[in-house]
Image (tube, grey):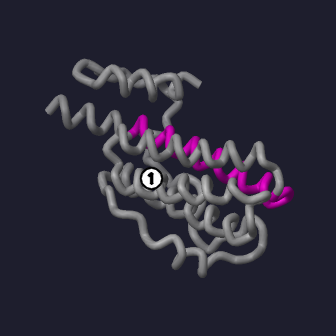
Amino acid sequence: VQSVSNDAELRLIFCSEAQDLLDDAERLLAALRGNSADTDSAHELQRVFHTLKGSARMADATGIADLGTTLDARAKHALGGARISDEDHKYFRAGVAIGWEMTDAFQTGRDDPPPDIDQRVETLSDEPGVTEAPSGPAELGADAQSTQPVAVDLEGVDQELLGIFMPECDE
């Protein structure tokens, strides 16, 4: 029973981290939309995807890790050019929208493989910031929205994972 509780706690911690990373990705994509040659934002975006990939692997969120791997590889490839192309930008927007959906699903216990990003790209508008896919976190429920401190028994939780995720919780 304790491991199930710890799995649920780790899931919540990871989902919070993933939501922060997806927020960062959206912010960076907005900056890149206005200046596709902004290499600092492009490198930071690649680091966000790389961190999403690694965090997801640590939380055993295989589908999200696969998505992060795909986005990280595409970002590394895009950084080989002088700027983020409109095609890359659209691809990343689709990937981030999928990331939100997958994080919401993982929050409820599902770990689905990522859908085809190229197919999702077809559903995106060419207008900046406009997607037909949901963006941003879904309602996590009353407990997740509470501002009251929650006592959590962390005995038995991998200390390395706690070291990675807990600093994010203190912010």
Q: Residue at 36% across / 23% down in the picture? A: 160
Query: Mainly helix, strand or loop, the magenta region?
Result: helix
On whether residue 47 falls in the magenta region, the answer is no
Up-down relation of residue 138 to residue 157 (above or below):
below
Q: Residue at 33% across / 23% down in the picture? A: 152
Circle count = 1
For residue 21, side relative to residue 139 (left or right): right
Quadrant occupied by the C terminus: top right
Up-down relation of residue 19 to residue 158 (above or below):
below
Looking at the rendered structure, the kind of residue marked 1 is Thr
For residue 12, side relative to residue 84 (left or right): left
Residue furthest toward the left? 1
Q: Viewer-proximal residue, 94 or 134?
A: 94
User: What residue is pinned by disc 1?
Assistant: 103
Q: Position of residue 139 (x, y in %)?
A: 49, 52
Quadrant occupied by the N terminus: top left
Magenta residues (range): 12-36
Residue furthest toward the front? 80
Numbered disc 1: secondary structure: helix
Quarter assignment of residue 37? bottom right
Q: Residue at 67% across / 53% down in the picture? A: 26
Quarter assignment of residue 136? bottom right
Q: Position of residue 70 (x, y in %)?
A: 49, 59
Query: Crowdedness of circle 1 by 10 Å Cα count: few (<14), some, many (20+)?
Result: many
Q: Viewer-proximal residue, 37 or 163?
A: 37
Q: Viewer-proximal residue, 112 or 39?
A: 39
Q: Position of residue 42 (x, y in %)?
A: 72, 50
On whether residue 24 falls in the magenta region, the answer is yes
